């Protein structure tokens, strides 16, 4: 199972993170039963990284900067394909 953790902290949310919650509906049919999507109050990356590249997402612990639904799906495909 691939786990996607979406940061819902204020900065990530206003920088596009709110749109990332469309991911479950956007997943291709062959991935829907292989992916779990969770939220996080804050992943903390914006505190440690300059310039900030929000929104942040983790896919199986791998950080995605400036995340978009399409970018997340590509990382998921790479993760599943590499297993």
Image: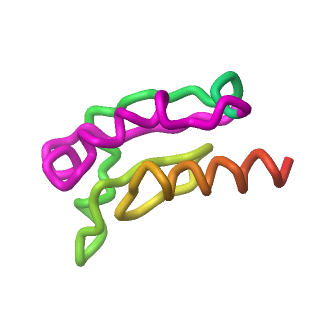
Closer to the camera, 81 or 25? Answer: 25
* Residue at x 35% of width, y 33% of height: 21
Marker count (numbered) = 0
Q: Is residue 73 above or below residue 22?
A: below
Q: Can you say which quadrant of the picture contains the N terminus?
A: top right
Q: Quadrant of residue 28?
A: top right
Instruction: Please name the colour scheme applied to the rendered image.
Output: rainbow
As for residue 49 lying within the magenta part, the answer is no
Q: Is residue 38 above or below residue 28?
A: above
Closer to the camera, 6 or 81? Answer: 81
Q: Is residue 61 above or below residue 40?
A: below
Residue 13 shown left or right of residue 67 in the figure = left
* Residue at x 72% of width, y 56% of height: 78
Residue 29 point in image, percent of width and height: 66, 29
Which residue of the protein is positioned furthest toward the right in this rendering? 83
Residue 77 shown left or right of residue 55 in the figure = right
Which residue of the protein is positioned furthest toward the top in this rendering? 33
Residue 27 point in image, percent of width and height: 56, 36
Q: Quadrant of residue 33?
A: top right
Residue 55 point in image, percent of width and height: 30, 55
Write down the region rendered in magenta: 1-30
Residue 23 point in image, percent of width and height: 45, 36
Q: Is residue 20 above or below residue 24?
A: below
Which residue of the protein is positioned furthest toward the bottom in this rendering? 51
* Residue at x 28% of width, y 42% of height: 19
């Amino acid at each position: 199972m691939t786990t996607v953790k979406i940061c819902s902290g204020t900065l990530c949310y206003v920088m596009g993170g709110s749109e990332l919650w469309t991911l479950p509906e956007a997943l291709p049919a062959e991935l829907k039963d292989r992916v779990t999507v969770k939220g996080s109050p804050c992943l903390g990356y914006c505190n440690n990284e300059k310039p900030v590249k929000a929104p942040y997402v983790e896919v199986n612990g791998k950080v995605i900067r400036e995340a978009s639904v399409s970018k997340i799906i590509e990382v998921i495909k790479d993760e599943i394909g590499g297993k």
